[in-house]
Amino acid sequence: MAKHGKTHNHIRRSLGDHIFNGANIVLFILISLIILFPFFNIFAISVTSNVEYMREPYIIWPKEPTMEAYSYIFSTSLIPRSYILTIGITIAATLLSTLITSMLAYGLCRGDLRGQKFFMIYLLITMFFSGGLIPNYMNISKTLGWSNNLLALIVPNSVSVFNFIIVRSFFRQLPASLEESARIDGANEWTILFRIIYPLSIPTLATIAMFVAVGTWNAWFAAMLYMRDEKLYPLQLIVRNFVVKEARPADMQNLEGLRDAAGNRIFLNEAGLKMACAVATVLPMVIIYPFIQKYFEKGMTIGAVKG
């Protein structure tokens, strides 16, 4: 019944519905805590002093947090240099892959292209089959001569077939009248792509750019294969060697000789150093992701409507 001109449509829920909803909320809170606790524990260890860690390695939060580990890793030349190097590699690889993948998708979304079916099959085959590690290594290091060259970390992954399918699916949903009207006004293919198609495709392009950026930022295996000079190591390879192989970077070999301004010996928590390195590698992606999450969600939804 309407009161004061307003209609109230309330769905009456049974006791069982309330219990089910409450149980779901509790369950997902527990799952979230289980997922977040390892990250919290890593950060807690990174701000724990050596004395406190040696006394009680399994702690929820240190009694006297310290930033000694972060101060030390950023006081060395290796970590800041690898940070800058990794940021540069990530930006270059992301821009190159997004540009090439989107241009390829634009060309192959048109029905009047000769050999379109052949190129689509050719690309899809590479999605399921590869030449293998040894041929890939020989091709990059010997044929192209990119051993100890940063191009080996940027160029080989320029085209992702998965990202290509997402972008092509979105491009095929755009009205053909947009291109037709632009051609009537005298626009060529480059103008149509950069002035019309790209501005309408920001959510999808941001989605594949995020995929490429995260993959490039976290990559270490290619650097381990092709990089010989430690100065060319990206951040993830340095942290991987430090954490997994117990191999300290060259700039961190003098932990035992550290002294403060008064000349007193400093004992750093080595486990804290490893965790500080891990936090430093994850932090940029954690900071960037919330700003592009809306594009990420929208892009995945739009690009998945039809093939």
Image (cartoon, grey):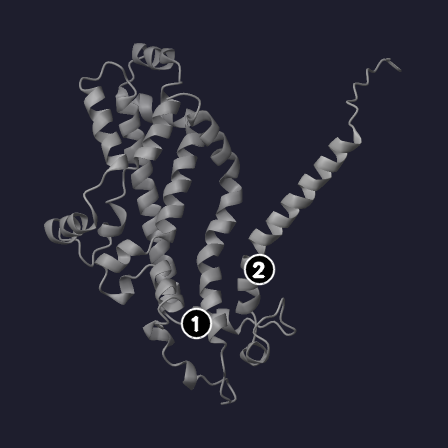
The amino acid marked with disc number 2 is Phe
Q: Secondary structure at mark 2?
A: helix
In percent of the image, x 73 and y 39: which residue is there?
Answer: 22
> 44 above or below 208?
below
> 138 above or below 270?
above
| Residue closer to the observer: 15 or 210 | 15
Most extreme residue toward the left is 143
Q: Secondary structure at mark 1?
A: helix
| Residue closer to the observer: 296 or 136 | 136
| Residue closer to the observer: 207 or 38 | 38
**Image x and y of residue 191, in percent:** 30, 23
**Image x and y of residue 107, in percent:** 26, 23
Of marks 2 and 1, the one in the foreground: 2
Distance of label 2 from label 1 (alpha carbons): 24 Å
In percent of the image, x 23 and y 26: which residue is there?
Answer: 121
Earlier residue among tags 2 and 1? 2
| Residue closer to the observer: 71 or 112 | 112
Q: Which residue is mark 1?
A: 75
Can see residue 35?
A: yes
Most extreme residue toward the right is 4
Local packing at callout 2 (Cα closer than 10 Å; few below 14, some 14-19, many 20+) is some
Label 2 with label 1: CB-CB less than 8 Å? no
Residue 168 occupies quadrant:
top left
**Image x and y of residue 83, in percent:** 38, 59
The amino acid marked with disc number 1 is Ser
Most extreme residue toward the bottom is 263
Q: Which residue is mark 2?
A: 40
In percent of the image, x 34 and y 72: which residue is there?
Answer: 247
> 33 above or below 231?
above
The quarter in which the N terminus is drawn is top right
Local packing at callout 1 (Cα closer than 10 Å; few below 14, some 14-19, many 20+) is few
